[in-house]
Image (tube, helix red, strand yellow):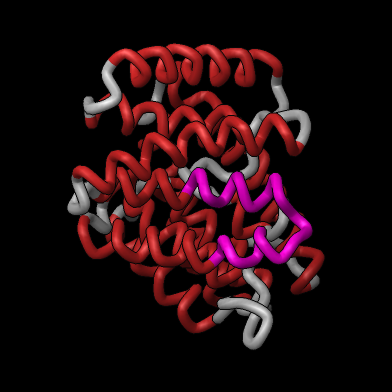
Amino acid sequence: MLLAALSFSLSAQGQPTTNGLFATRAASAFALAKTAWAAHPEDASAACHLGQTSYDWSLFATNAEQRAAVAQTGIAACRQWVANHPQSAPGHYYLAMDYGELAEAEAPSLAAYKLIREIEHEFKIANELSNRLDYAGPPRCLGLLYRDAPGWPVSIGNRHKAREYLEQAAALAPDFPENQLNLVESHIHWHQAADAEKAWHKLTAIWPAARTNLTGVDWEVSWDDWTSRRAAVKADYQKTFKKALP
């Protein structure tokens, strides 16, 4: 993606698998949501669902044109939604998500980088309105954005803000694997071995219960992603610090 920040766990589900079954499901859900919103454009729930499914489907796009078209559909629905319901946290949240996919489609370009400010703005609003939405999705996504965006003066990247928001997400939804994974990955990236180990222990502790509680078709993409990332951080930790995770 344009920036790792724009491939968020931005679900926030992290980087998705390319499994054809997952892509087919996402495309079907998007098509149904698009039809429902077209029939009831003033329905907030229909707009919400289209914003979410637009993001989900755009992750599987095979080219920039397709990704842009899908993202723009979600953006249109979310813009109308927040215009009519400015205090809707999901509206601002999914608008930011879809902006991220549009930025990816337009990269590399000045327009893509300008969208980062829009993404930040919408996530901040969502965070103020409901920071627990989507298992602390707004602070999680802000943390990833600040972590992975280029720093000043090019863009908004900021390690201090990244850590603040990622830790906030983990504190608000400590049993959600994505939040702990982000911390492990970030601490390894920042060469903070002790903090990486601490987050790893928390991830290991919550993993069995999460496996039991987060089940069903809707969670299959997430578990595919989390499982591969969990294995990857063990290898990354050993490569970075020359020792195995305890």
**Residue lying at 69% horizontally and 60% vertically, measured from the top left:** 3
Give the prevailing secondary structure in the magenta stretch. Answer: helix
Q: Would you say 147 lies left or right of 47 here? A: right
Q: As rendered, which of 25 and 31 lies closer to the eye?
A: 31
Return the x and y of residue 129 as percentages of the image width and height: 21, 58
Return the x and y of residue 160 as percentages of the image width and height: 49, 83
Figure check: 209 above or below 169: above
Q: As rendered, which of 221 and 38 lies closer to the eye?
A: 38
Return the x and y of residue 144 as percentages of the image width and height: 53, 63
Figure check: 153 above or below 79: below
**Residue lying at 34% horizontally and 21% vertically, measured from the top left:** 37
**Residue lying at 46% horizontally and 28% vertically, measured from the top left:** 53
Q: Would you say 111 lies left or right of 35 here? A: right
Magenta run includes residue 111: yes
**Residue lying at 58% horizontally and 31% vertically, measured from the top left:** 70
**From where the camera sits, is residue 212 visible?**
no
Instruction: Give the residues drawn in magenta, as a range.
Output: 97-116
Figure check: 240 above or below 245: below
| Count of numbered marks | 0
Q: Quadrant of residue 79?
A: top left
Quarter of the image with the C terminus in it = bottom right
Return the x and y of residue 134 as percentages of the image width and height: 33, 44
Q: As rendered, which of 5 and 17 lies closer to the eye?
A: 5
Figure check: 126 above or below 211: below
**From where the camera sits, is residue 156 visible?**
yes
Magenta run includes residue 58: no
